[in-house]
Image: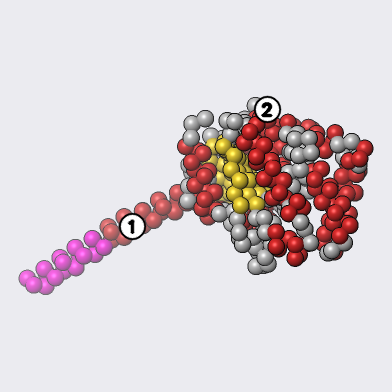
């Protein structure tokens, strides 16, 4: 009799354990499925998106030489995005400091096609860009809204971008005069050659600079941004004047941060329906190899950015 009871007890334990494991496995499978992401890689973009659910898309533009894989490697935001089933669209659109009207139209068509063909959510779109990619973010977002594109950003963020092309030309001039570092001199030569060929010498007129630049502080020109009124807009920079002085012999007026701050002040006046923020950081700028550099993706507080995006997604526009 005791032997039979022991067998019954053993069978009961096995059944309970099996059922418990089965429930646990099902739960784990459910959790796994909600966190599953698929990667889509094309010539001009890459996408990381959840296989199910999600209603938020982040579009990212890298710095001048950066492609989609560079952005992924330097800006580790995907794990944060996965927590809330966000889609990230990494654009292979670089080597641009500005956009012509034709380029804006082409990119608008391309984004509409990418969203449609990949079934990307359009309810809550954010666009962000680092350095020259920030200029693209500003100019393209303004055009998307003015053109009433299917891709409509709720918020945009810009990371240490050269928002004033005319002032960037003047910085290049000063760098050539200083002749302080090989890096600065080579960049200055390249910039002046590009601007002279494409936009003309400023002494002969600045019409082209005003036409293509997000902001021209000399004349307080910002007509390329007027359609951003109503958006949530963030600017990031790390104005480490000591680092720039020691490494490039820059004065504060040579920093992107100087002109970003001027633009922010003007936007707060001229875009009354926008929420414009200027976030400055300290000692956060580091490259992948650990090298100190204030002009880096790393100055962004990713948790804070995530919360900002989630809040924007919940706001009624």
Q: Residues within 10 Å of mark 2 (few under 14, many from 20)?
A: few
Residue 301 lies, in percent from the top left, at 55, 54
Residue plotted at (75% across, 34% down): 221
Task: Examine the rendering and report whether any part of residue 310 can be seen.
Answer: yes
Residue 36 lies, in percent from the top left, at 50, 51
Q: Is mark 1 on a helix, strand or loop?
A: helix
Q: Give the camera-side residue of 161 and 20.
A: 161
Q: CB atoms at circles 2 and 1 under 8 Å apart?
A: no
Q: Is mark 2 on a helix, strand or loop?
A: helix
Residue 231 lies, in percent from the top left, at 59, 34
Q: In this view, does 28 lie to the left or right of 172?
A: left
Q: Distance between the residues labelled 2 and 1?
A: 51 Å
Q: Which of marks 2 and 1 is in front?
A: 2
* Main secondary structure of the magenta stretch: helix
Q: Is residue 13 magenta?
A: yes
Residue of label 1: 24
All told, the count of numbered labels is 2
Q: Give the camera-side residue of 79 and 42.
A: 79
Q: Is residue 306 above or below residue 317?
A: below
Q: Is residue 56 magenta?
A: no
Task: Examine the rendering and report whether any part of residue 109 can be seen.
Answer: no
Residue of label 2: 146
Residue 125 lies, in percent from the top left, at 57, 38
């Amino acid at each position: 009799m005791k032997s039979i009871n022991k067998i019954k007890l053993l069978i009961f334990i096995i059944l309970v354990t099996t059922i418990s494991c089965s429930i646990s496995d099902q739960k784990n499978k459910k959790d796994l499925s909600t966190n599953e992401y698929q990667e889509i890689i094309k010539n001009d973009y890459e996408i990381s998106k959840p296989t199910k659910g999600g209603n938020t898309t982040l579009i990212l533009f890298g710095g001048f030489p950066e492609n989609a894989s560079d952005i992924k490697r330097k800006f580790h935001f995907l794990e944060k995005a996965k927590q809330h089933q966000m889609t990230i669209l990494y654009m292979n659109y670089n080597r641009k400091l500005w956009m012509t009207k034709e380029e804006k139209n082409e990119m608008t068509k391309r984004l509409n096609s990418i969203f449609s063909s990949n079934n990307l959510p359009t309810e809550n779109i954010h666009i962000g860009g680092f350095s020259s990619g920030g200029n693209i973010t500003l100019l393209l977002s303004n055009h998307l809204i003015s053109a009433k594109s299917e891709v409509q950003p709720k918020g945009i963020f810009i990371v240490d971008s050269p928002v004033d092309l005319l002032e960037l030309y003047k910085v290049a001039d000063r760098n050539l005069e200083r002749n302080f570092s090989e890096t600065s001199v080579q960049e200055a030569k390249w910039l002046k050659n590009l601007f002279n060929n494409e936009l003309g010498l400023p002494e002969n007129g600045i019409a082209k600079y005003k036409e293509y630049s997000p902001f021209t502080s000399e004349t307080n020109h910002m007509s390329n941004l007027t359609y951003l009124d109503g958006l949530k807009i963030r600017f990031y920079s790390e104005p480490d004047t000591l680092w720039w002085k020691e490494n490039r012999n820059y004065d504060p007026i040579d920093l992107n941060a100087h002109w970003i701050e001027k633009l922010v002040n003007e936007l707060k006046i001229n875009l009354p329906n926008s929420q414009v923020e200027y976030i400055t950081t300290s000692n956060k700028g580091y490259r992948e190899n650990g090298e100190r550099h204030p002009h880096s993706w790393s100055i962004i507080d990713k948790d804070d950015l995530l919360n900002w995006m989630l809040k924007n997604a919940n706001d009624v526009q």
